[in-house]
Amino acid sequence: MVRRVVTGHDANGKAVVISDDTPPLTLTNPARPGYVSTDIWRTNATPTPVVAHHPEPTLGPRRQMPEKNGTVFRINRIMPETHEITDMTPEQSKKLFAALGNEQASTFHKNQRHPLMHRTETIDYVLILSGEIYCVLDDTEVLLKAGDTMIQCGTNHAWSNRSNAPCDIAFVLIDGKFAPELAKSLEGK
């Protein structure tokens, strides 16, 4: 379980701990045994209003993507890859992304490289907390290990754990917009 400590301010403006507990939104998926995705925090504006006591921002339906001008901070546990993942059909892949709230992100039907290939219109800060994982791109891949970071710039990708141990990853997704020239080059891909 992930511990989340949230600070804020009391009535006199003094810094205090508002909550110290597990985050309320954790997602699992029967198609991926052992997979756990925990939303830590969300924002919905830039700049984000800083208030004395933030209401819980992670409640409501699961959304893979941040809101417009927002962010998502999440921690995922990705288990070693099984044949249920590697043998997935494009329809099963779309269904898996639909469960994350983002069916349209799936690009597996267009690129048969990995069943979990997807693209989001975000800049993602990625930190490997434990284990190791491959980030699979259109024609290449890179192995990331505990302590490694990656900046994912709206690229088509998948996460492939080929080890025999879980991989824990911290993500911060930042709402973005493809530049017109990049958007044009991505049409139909």
Image: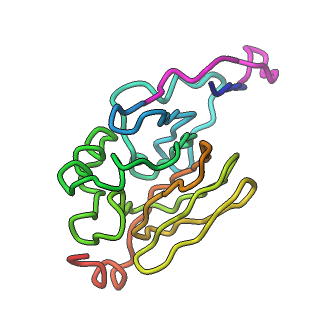
Report the span colored magenta. 8-27
At which x and y percent is residue 73? 56, 42
From what the image shows, is residue 96 above or below residue 162? above
155 and 95: which one is in front? 95
* Colour scheme shown: rainbow
Q: Which residue occupies 82% across, 21% down? A: 14
- Within the magenta stretch, is there residue 154? no
At which x and y percent is residue 133? 58, 57
> What is the quadrant of the N terminus in the image?
top right
Q: Which residue occupies 43% across, 70% down? A: 155
161 and 60: which one is in front? 161
From what the image shows, is residue 130 above or below residue 50? below
From what the image shows, is residue 135 above or below residue 19? below
Residue 62 as seen in the image, left or right of residue 171: left
> What is the quadrant of the C terminus in the image?
bottom left
- Within the magenta stretch, is there residue 20? yes
Extreme-top residue of the structure: 11
Extreme-left residue of the structure: 91
